[in-house]
Amino acid sequence: MTTEAITPEAPAAVGNEPVEHTHHGYSPRKDEYLKRLRRVEGQVRGIARMVDEDTYCIDVLTQVAAATKALHAVSMGLLEDHLNHCVADAAQQAQDSGDPELIQAKVAEASAAIARLLR
C-alpha cells in the first residue's frame, strides 16, 4: 500500500491536549478501506455459512486465516497512514511550538496501537 502525501491544516494544540484533525490520515483512502472491509465482511459471512453447513474444520480454519490476513492488511495500512499523517503533523507542531510532548503523545499512541495489533 502506498500513501498519498497530504498536508492538511490542523488546529493548534491547546496546552498538552492532543491535536484533533479535521480529517484522519486515512481519509484519502477511505473508499479503498471500506471496499476491503466489505470484502472481509463477506468472508466472515461465508465462514459462518460454512460452520452452519458443517464444513470440514480445516477448510473453515483456512478461511478464518484468510479473513484474519485481510484485516491485518487493513490495520497495517491504517497504521501507516497514522504515522504518515498524525505523527508527522505532531512532529511538525512540536518543532514549531518547541513542545516535545506533542510528538511524544502521538508516538505513545502509535506504540499502544502496535502493541494491540501484536497481541
Image (cartoon, rainbow, N blue to C red):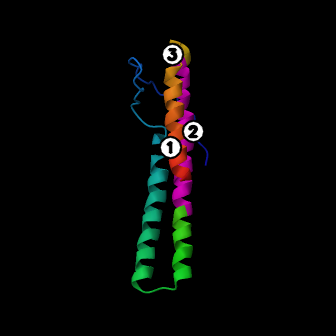
**Amino acid type, residue under disc 1 in the picture:** Ala
Cα distance, mark 3 to mark 1?
23 Å
Q: Which residues are magenta?
A: 69-94
* CB atoms of marks 3 and 2 within 8 Å: no
**Amino acid type, residue under disc 3 in the picture:** Asp
- Above or below: residue 69 compared with residue 103: below
Residue lying at the far right in this picture: please name it. Answer: 2
Cα distance, mark 3 to mark 2?
27 Å
**Helix, strand, or loop for circle 2?**
loop
Residue 62: percent from the left, percent from the top? 57, 74
Residue 47: percent from the left, percent from the top? 45, 75
Cα distance, mark 2 to mark 1?
22 Å
Q: Kindly report which numbered mark, 3 or 2, lies closer to the viewer in this rendering.
A: 3
- Above or below: residue 9 compared with residue 84: above
**Residue beneath the point at 61% across and 45% down:** 2
* Mark 2 residue crowding within 10 angstroms, few (<14) / some (14–19) / many (20+): few
**Helix, strand, or loop for circle 3?**
loop
Tell which circle, 3 or 1, labels the residue nearer the N-terminal end.
3
**Numbered tag placed on residue 113 in the rendering:** 1
Q: Residue 90: tell me if it is visible.
A: no
**Residue beneath the point at 56% across and 62% down:** 69
**Residue beneath the point at 55% across and 56% down:** 72
User: Which residue is at the front of the view, 21 or 15?
Assistant: 15
Residue 8: percent from the left, percent from the top? 47, 28
Residue 23: percent from the left, percent from the top? 41, 35
**Amino acid type, residue under disc 2 in the picture:** Glu
Can you identify the residue that label 3 sits on? 99
User: Which residue is at the front of the view, 2 or 45?
Assistant: 45
**Numbered tag placed on residue 4 in the rendering:** 2
